[in-house]
Image: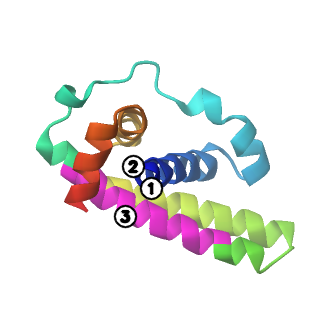
């Protein structure tokens, strides 16, 4: 179960970090403000939404890992900023391509972090 929580934590944090702003450190500090005000329960998400989330999650995690590798390979702040902007754009596109809005994606991620049964169900869809 720890692996599942780690995956959803990484995905949500990674997306919040890259979407929140141009600098990773600044975005991490502002992450608390990115959480949607109300979390839906697992029953509020359709199977289609969960499948869309599972698809987007796979892409978002992959994109985040690629961006981290690129960030580690350079110390140039301008290059790092460009990497973050590109990753942000690609992640948002992956979520959109999966058929979700950013708010939907974040709500499902938050619900999965607090509901191990939902997280397990999503993991089985991947």
Residue 52, position as x, y percentages in the image: 23, 52
Q: For the residues carrying marks 3 and 1, which lies nearer the camera in this image?
A: 1
The residue sitting at the top extreme is 38
Is-magenta flag for residue 54?
A: yes
Q: CA distance from mark 3 to mark 2?
A: 18 Å
Q: Which residue is mark 2?
A: 1
For the stretch drawn in magenta, the main secondary structure is helix
Q: Which residue is mark 1?
A: 3
Label 3 or label 2, whichever comes before in sequence order:
2
Q: Are the residues tagged 2 and 1 within 8 Å (C-beta)?
A: yes
Q: Are the residues tagged 3 and 1 within 8 Å (C-beta)?
A: no
Label 3 or label 1, whichever comes before in sequence order:
1
Under circle 1, the secondary element is helix
Under circle 2, the secondary element is loop
Q: Quadrant of the C terminus?
A: bottom left
Is-magenta flag for residue 19?
A: no
Horizontal arrangement in the rendering, residue 74 relative to residue 36 (left or right): right
Tell me the residue at 57%/47% (across/down): 13
The residue sitting at the left extreme is 47
Judging depth in this view, the residue of 125 and 31 nearest the camera is 125
- Residue span colored magenta: 51-68
Horizontal arrangement in the rendering, residue 6 relative to residue 100 (left or right): right
Q: CA distance from mark 2 to mark 1?
A: 5 Å
Q: Is residue 33 visible?
A: yes
Q: Which residue is mark 3?
A: 58
């Amino acid at each position: 179960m720890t692996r599942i929580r780690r995956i959803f934590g990484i995905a949500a944090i990674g997306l919040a970090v890259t979407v929140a702003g141009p600098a990773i450190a600044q975005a991490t500090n502002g992450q608390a403000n990115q959480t949607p005000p109300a979390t839906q329960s697992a029953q509020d998400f359709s199977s289609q939404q969960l499948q869309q989330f599972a698809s987007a999650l796979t892409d978002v995690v992959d994109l985040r890992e690629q961006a981290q590798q690129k960030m580690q390979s350079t110390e140039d702040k301008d290059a790092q900023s460009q990497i973050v902007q590109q990753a942000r754009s690609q992640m948002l596109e992956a979520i959109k391509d999966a058929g979700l809005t950013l708010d939907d994606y974040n709500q499902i991620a938050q619900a999965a972090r607090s509901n191990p049964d939902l997280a397990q169900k999503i993991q089985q869809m991947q």
